[in-house]
Every structure is written in structure tokens, then in C-alpha cells.
Image (tube, grey):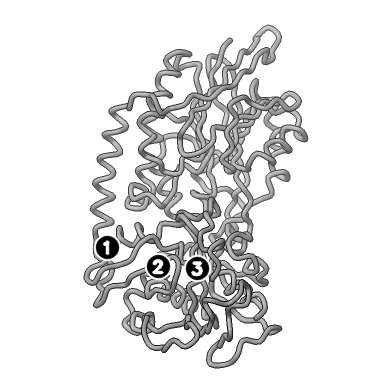
């Protein structure tokens, strides 16, 4: 008995790929027969940087998954940490026509999975029982803030495998855990036939064989569709063959139905994002490599949002400036697309000074970043609020700064300061010393653009954003 499993992962709302993905899925299903094919997505299909997603609260993604014939999905962190439970219930409880399989995301209030999710799912294909277990990456602090008691995968999956194994002929784990965890699971948890992976964007053109488990993944952004062909021997009651591969979608024709569907939802999204959310009395320019009013405004917003002494954010979070006049939700998304959350932490004066020195160096300002929620291009310099920094542009590296004032007082090396910043720095990316902060507190579900919007509506904040915080030696203060 031959079976085929089709899988995708980490598409991240790359809608330009989805009509071709649908075309590949339909062709491969037709080759094997609908009744012998199972189509799965392994999470992070959604990414709120894309207007089609942001303007419809993810409904475009769900509509495409439905129309493309997916039968089950699991959640990635971009779904679970980007939306509140109410939005997820609408998407996966009312909009989705597929099963949402995730075993390690119970609600904190009840200790139970939400009504729209199941820990496992059994599918019958041509008389073969296929068991699916879904599991997602364990970002405990972040999920707790959104009301989820996310569980450690290796505490939840092994007993579920033992429970489900006698009930099924083929057992598949849909794992949004990353390659290292997939390898560990294959080595440590007996009874799994197939692990379909995601999260770390790894592409396995040839599957890994670890013990009796096949480990597969299709990279990122919808560039590939994964195919696993299985052969089940009903007489022997076992799998006798399992082969995997990936199919590039770039040369495939577009599925017209999916292309049209995305277009329809895109019009709805555009209408929603076209609404005016603020009106500016002045232009707000930006600069990745120097101080700017818009960068100052965001840093000030982070300080005020979290009632901190200091606000810090890298200039690369902003991808554009804002003109005088009306500001739409779409303009805000375009200039600040990253799904990055505010974070408050404690940093010593020494740690702050090192980060400020690094932010004056080209090797940091020009540093490209990938992942960690960042959707920009380069790190950029540091935008600050609550500080006045006097520096010598011609000074030696790590000795350019002459003085730093915090609230009118000199920066103290050993003192701990309360800093409003961003979660990205806690992952030890960007400026090195900012990853050493202590007592980090995360603020969810707000993104940076939510912080920025509040500041755009505040006349006092707008005026203050033009006050200089970085002053070259001999330079006058006042405006940028």
C-alpha cells in the first residue's frame, strides 16, 4: 500500500509563492491519488509583516491553506506569539477547515488545550491509520504573558507517542522545534516513523535517517514542497519503504484559483490598512546611521510605555520616514514591520556605555540581522531617550564617548538602570552588552508599531523627538 505525505513549513506569508505551492500540491496529489495523500503544514505560515496578513488578521493565510487542500497544521511561534487567543480562536476555530494539532499549548487558566486544537489527530488513508502529533517551540516567558502554559516538548511528546503508537500504523510528529530538537527526538523517542520539521528554516534535500525515524524539512519562505513516499505492507503490518525529497516551486505554474483568492483578500487588506491612524503636523525623517526624530520618537515611546529611565532601540527597526499629514495603518506597517515586542530590563552603566560605543562603529551599524523577529536589513545605530551623549566622532574605537548624562546626572558605571528596549536584544544579537541585561520583562502582544502609534498621536512626544540626544564635541544642542 503506497502513501504520500506532502509538507511545507515556515512560509512566513510569502504569498507570491502560494499559487505555485498549490500547483505543486495538486500535481503531486493527482500522481499518488487523493485518497492516498496527506497534506500538512508545520507552522509559521503566518507572518504579520505582510499586508495581506496584517490587514485581515491572518484570514488570508487560513483561506489559502483551506483552498490548497491542507488537512492538518501545527502552530509556529509566529502564529502563537503574534495573536491573542481570541484571534487564534477565530482563525483556527471558525475559519479553518483543517485540523490544528498541537500538544504542548494548554491555556494557563484551564490547563486544557483550546477547543480549536487537538494534541493528536488520526487520519485514515486507503485503510492505513496515520497518527499526527503537533508540537511547537517552548518560549515560556512569552507564551505565559499571552495566557498559555506552554509545555516542554520532551515532557509531552514521548508519553503521547507511547499512547498513540498502538492505535496507528504510521506515526508522524509535526515539529516546529528546530533541527537539533528533531534530531534529538528521533534518537531518544522510539516509535516515530516520520518527523516533519520547521522553525530553524533548515532545508533537508535528503532526509536524515536516525534509527527508525525519517527527519524532513523544506527550508523557508515557500521555496520548496516536501514529499515523503511511504509503502505499508498490510500482511507484515509495517512500513517497508520511506523515501523523502523536496520539490522547488520556482518553475511551477501558478494555480489560478489561489492567485485570485489572494487578490480578493489583498483588496480587503488594503482597504483596512488604508485607514488613517494619525495625522502629523511635521515630517518625521529617519536615519539608520545617525540620530533622527523618528528614531528618537520610538526610543522615547519605549521608555514611556514601560515607565523606564532610559529608552533604547536600534535604528534599523525603522525602514522609512513619515511625511507631514495623514498616516495610515499600512504606512506604519511598511516602516516598522518586525513582530518585535517591547522589553524592560536592568543594565549597568558599564553595559550601557559599551552598547553606546558599539553603536558608533560601522561594523555594528552595517551588521545584517536574520531571524529573532527582525524584518529589517541592518542593525543601525542606537536611538536613545533619557540620555544625553557627548562624543568625539574622531576618537578611537570604544573611546569616542566623552560623557553620558541620565536625567541630568552623570552615568554611573556600577549603577543598574531600568531600560525600556526590545526583546530582540535579550537573544544576544546586535549590541553585545544589551544581551547581558537582567530581570527582563516582556510586554505582549504589542509590537513596536503599536508603541510608535501612541507616540505619533502625542503632540508633546512629537516636539520632544526633535531634541538632540547625541551631541558631537563642540556641537550646539537644540534640534536635530
Q: Quadrant of residue 212?
A: top right
Q: Look at 36% across and 45% down and name the residue there.
A: 59
Query: From this viewpoint, is residue 109 visible?
Result: no
Q: Which label number is shown at residue 328? A: 1
Tell which tag, 1 or 3, sits nearer the viewer.
3
Along the line of sight, the residue nearer the viewer: 170 or 356 = 356
Query: From this viewpoint, is residue 57 visible?
Result: yes
Against 288, residue 418 (above or below) is below
Q: Quadrant of residue 140?
A: bottom right
Label 1: state its secondary structure: strand
The percent position of residue 239, horizontal first and vertical second, equals 67, 15
Q: Which label number is shown at residue 381? A: 3
| Alpha-carbon span between mark 1 and mark 2 | 21 Å
Q: Look at 32% across and 72% down and name the residue there.
A: 284
Label 3: state its secondary structure: loop
Locate residue 385 relative to residue 185 in the image: left or right: left
| Alpha-carbon span between mark 3 and mark 2 | 9 Å
Pointer 2: what residue?
287
Amino acid at each position: 500500500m503506497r502513501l504520500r505525505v506532502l509538507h511545507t513549513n515556515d512560509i512566513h506569508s510569502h504569498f507570491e509563492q502560494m499559487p505555485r505551492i498549490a500547483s505543486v500540491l495538486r500535481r503531486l496529489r493527482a500522481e499518488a491519488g487523493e485518497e492516498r495523500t496527506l497534506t500538512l503544514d508545520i507552522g509559521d505560515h503566518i507572518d504579520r509583516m505582510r499586508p495581506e496578513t496584517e490587514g485581515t488578521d491572518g484570514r488570508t493565510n487560513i483561506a489559502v491553506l483551506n483552498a490548497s487542500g491542507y488537512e492538518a497544521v501545527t502552530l509556529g511561534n509566529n502564529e502563537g506569539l503574534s495573536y491573542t487567543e481570541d484571534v487564534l480562536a477565530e482563525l483556527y476555530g471558525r475559519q479553518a477547515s483543517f485540523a490544528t494539532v498541537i500538544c504542548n499549548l494548554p491555556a494557563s487558566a484551564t490547563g486544557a488545550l483550546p477547543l480549536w486544537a487537538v494534541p493528536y489527530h488520526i487520519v485514515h488513508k486507503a485503510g492505513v491509520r496515520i497518527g499526527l502529533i503537533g508540537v511547537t517551540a517552548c518560549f515560556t516567558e512569552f507564551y505565559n504573558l499571552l495566557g498559555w502554559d506552554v509545555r516542554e516538548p520532551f515532557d509531552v511528546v514521548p508519553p503521547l507517542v507511547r499512547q498513540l503508537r498502538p492505535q496507528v500504523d504510521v506515526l508522524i510528529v509535526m515539529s516546529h522545534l528546530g533541527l537539533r530538537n528533531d534530531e534529538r527526538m528521533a534518537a531518544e523517542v522510539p516509535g516515530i516513523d516520520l518527523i516533519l520539521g520547521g522553525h530553524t528554516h533548515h532545508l533537508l534535500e535528503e532526509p536524515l535517517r536516525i534509527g527508525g525515524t525519517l527527519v524532513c524539512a523544506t527550508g523557508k519562505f515557500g521555496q520548496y514542497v516536501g514529499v515523503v513516499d511511504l509503502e505499508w505492507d498490510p500482511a507484515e503490518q509495517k512500513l517497508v519503504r520511506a523515501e523523502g525529497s523536496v520539490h522547488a516551486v520556482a518553475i511551477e505554474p501558478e494555480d489560478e484559483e489561489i492567485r485570485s483568492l489572494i487578490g480578493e483578500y489583498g483588496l480587503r487588506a488594503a482597504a483596512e490598512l488604508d485607514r488613517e491612524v494619525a495625522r502629523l503636523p511635521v515630517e518625521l525623517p529617519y536615519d539608520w546611521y545617525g540620530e533622527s526624530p523618528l528614531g528618537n520618537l520610538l526610543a522615547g515611546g519605549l521608555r514611556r510605555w514601560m515607565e523606564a529611565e532610559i529608552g533604547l532601540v536600534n535604528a534599523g527597526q525603522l525602514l522609512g520616514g513619515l511625511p507631514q499629514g495623514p498616516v495610515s495603518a499600512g504606512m506604519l506597517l511598511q516602516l516598522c514591520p518586525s513582530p518585535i515586542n517591547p522589553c524592560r530590563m536592568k543594565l549597568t552603566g558599564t553595559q550601557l556605555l559599551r552598547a553606546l560605543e558599539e553603536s558608533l562603529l560601522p561594523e555594528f551599524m552595517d551588521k545584517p540581522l536574520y531571524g529573532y523577529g527582525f524584518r529589517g536589513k541592518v542593525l543601525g545605530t542606537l536611538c536613545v531617550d533619557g540620555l544625553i551623549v557627548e562624543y568625539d566622532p574622531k576618537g578611537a574605537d570604544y573611546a569616542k564617548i566623552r560623557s553620558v548624562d541620565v536625567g541630568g546626572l552623570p552615568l554611573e558605571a556600577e549603577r543598574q538602570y531600568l531600560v525600556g528596549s526590545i526583546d530582540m536584544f535579550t537573544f544576544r544579537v546586535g549590541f553585545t552588552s544589551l544581551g547581558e541585561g537582567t530581570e527582563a520583562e516582556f510586554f505582549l502582544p504589542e509590537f513596536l508599531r503599536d508603541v510608535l502609534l501612541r507616540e505619533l498621536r502625542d503632540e508633546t512626544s512629537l516636539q520632544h523627538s526633535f531634541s538632540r540626544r547625541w551631541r558631537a564635541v563642540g556641537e550646539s544642542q537644540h534640534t536635530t
